[in-house]
Image (cartoon, grey):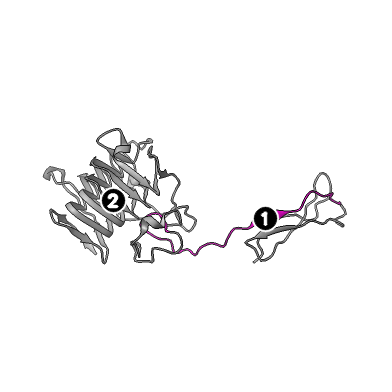
């Protein structure tokens, strides 16, 4: 679903089913109107919404005066201030992804007033034009701790406490330098460390992700999309190993024992070194 313009004002408003795609809208700076994809004030709840490929002076994806965002993707937007979002008030962002946005001040998110709470979310790959180690989160004061509260949130280049720092490994992200762009796949690669990295308690009430898939397939993931990757087998863990023994180079009379969990059987092989001919290698593996 494509919407070229949305203005929400004064009264409570909720967007949920099915998700909205607010994309490819350009707000002309000369009009003095901010919010490339969305401009809203009051008690606004955005759930399962995509804001991407928009341009504005402030708030490339959205310009918000108080809001709650759940399962929202903000990607590929451009603005001088708040490449992804410009916010005033005390909004809450849950299970959301802000990625690939571009802006001089706060390429991901800029807070003018209030405190933004980010839970189980991802802020990654947003860039300023200089692209030199600047924080992706910004506010109208240098003390960012007064404007942001991170809880189980992955925030690249963030000086804030409580944030996680590791590459979420999106499936096919688009670089911020290519914004504005409505392209890119921000689901999680099956090797992403963001899988099962969330807090289930913070995701209470979330039954589906942005794509409408079940939100809980194990421990909740970070970001707008839940991985459908099955929970991995439990790791092989050695619980008991044999004591030291004298190794017979003829490969006879060598006895040792070990106990492990997470495997139905254990295969051991040997390898001889220190000038002796190589015969077999010893290692431990899970035998399926």
Total marks shown come to: 2
Start-end of magenta stretch: 220-248
Q: Residue 34: horizontal and vertical position, in percent?
A: 17, 46
Quarter of the rendering occupied by the C terminus: bottom right
Give the image location of residue 270, x and y in percent: 77, 54
Residue 105 visible in this rendered orientation of the protein: no
Would residue 10 appear left or right of 243 to someone viewing this image? left
Location of residue 281 (image quadrant): bottom right
Magenta highlight: main SS? loop
Question: Could you tell me residue 14's position as x and y percent?
Answer: 21, 60
Q: Secondary structure at mark 2?
A: strand
Residue 240 magenta-drawn? yes
How crowded pointer 2 is (Cα within 10 Å; few <14, some 14-19, many 20+) is rated as some
Provide the residue designation for mark 2: 92
Give the camera-side residue of 249 and 153: 153
- Residue 137 at x, y percent in the picture: 32, 41
Using the image as rendered, state which of residue 152 and residue 1 is in the foreground. Answer: 152
Relative to 217, is 277 above or below? above
Front: mark 1 or 2? 1
Residue at 66% across, 66% down: 264
Residue 222 appears in which quarter of the rendering? bottom left
For this orientation, the residue located farthest to the front is 201
Residue at image mark 1? 239
Q: Earlier in the sequence, mark 1 or mark 2?
A: 2
């Amino acid at each position: 679903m494509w919407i070229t313009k949305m203005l929400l004002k004064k009264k409570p408003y909720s967007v949920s089913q099915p998700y909205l795609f607010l994309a490819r809208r350009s707000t002309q700076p000369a009009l003095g109107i901010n919010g490339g994809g969305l401009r809203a004030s009051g008690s606004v709840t955005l759930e399962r919404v995509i804001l991407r490929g928009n341009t504005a002076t402030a708030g490339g994806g959205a310009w918000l005066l108080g809001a709650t965002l759940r399962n929202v993707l903000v990607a590929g937007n451009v603005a001088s201030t708040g490449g992804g979002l410009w916010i005033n008030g005390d909004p809450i962002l849950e299970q959301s992804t802000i990625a690939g946005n571009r802006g001089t001040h706060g390429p991901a998110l800029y807070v003018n007033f209030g405190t933004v709470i980010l839970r189980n979310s991802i802020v990654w790959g947003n860039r300023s034009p200089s692209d030199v180690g600047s924080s992706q989160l910004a506010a109208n004061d240098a003390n960012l701790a007064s404007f942001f509260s991170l809880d189980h949130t992955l925030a690249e280049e963030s000086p804030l406490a409580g944030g996680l720092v590791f590459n979420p490994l999106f499936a096919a992200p688009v670089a911020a330098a290519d914004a504005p762009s409505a392209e890119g796949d921000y689901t999680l690669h099956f090797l992403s460390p963001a899988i099962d990295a969330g807090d289930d308690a913070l995701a209470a009430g979330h039954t589906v992700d942005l794509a409408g898939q079940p939100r809980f397939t194990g421990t909740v993931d970070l970001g707008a999309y839940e991985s459908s990757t099955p929970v991995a087998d439990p790791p092989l863990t050695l619980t008991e190993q044999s004591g030291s023994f004298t190794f017979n180079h003829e490969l006879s009379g060598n006895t040792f024992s070990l106990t492990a969990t997470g495997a139905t059987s254990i295969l051991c092989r040997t390898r001889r070194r220190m000038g002796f001919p190589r015969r077999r290698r010893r290692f431990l593996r899970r035998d399926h």
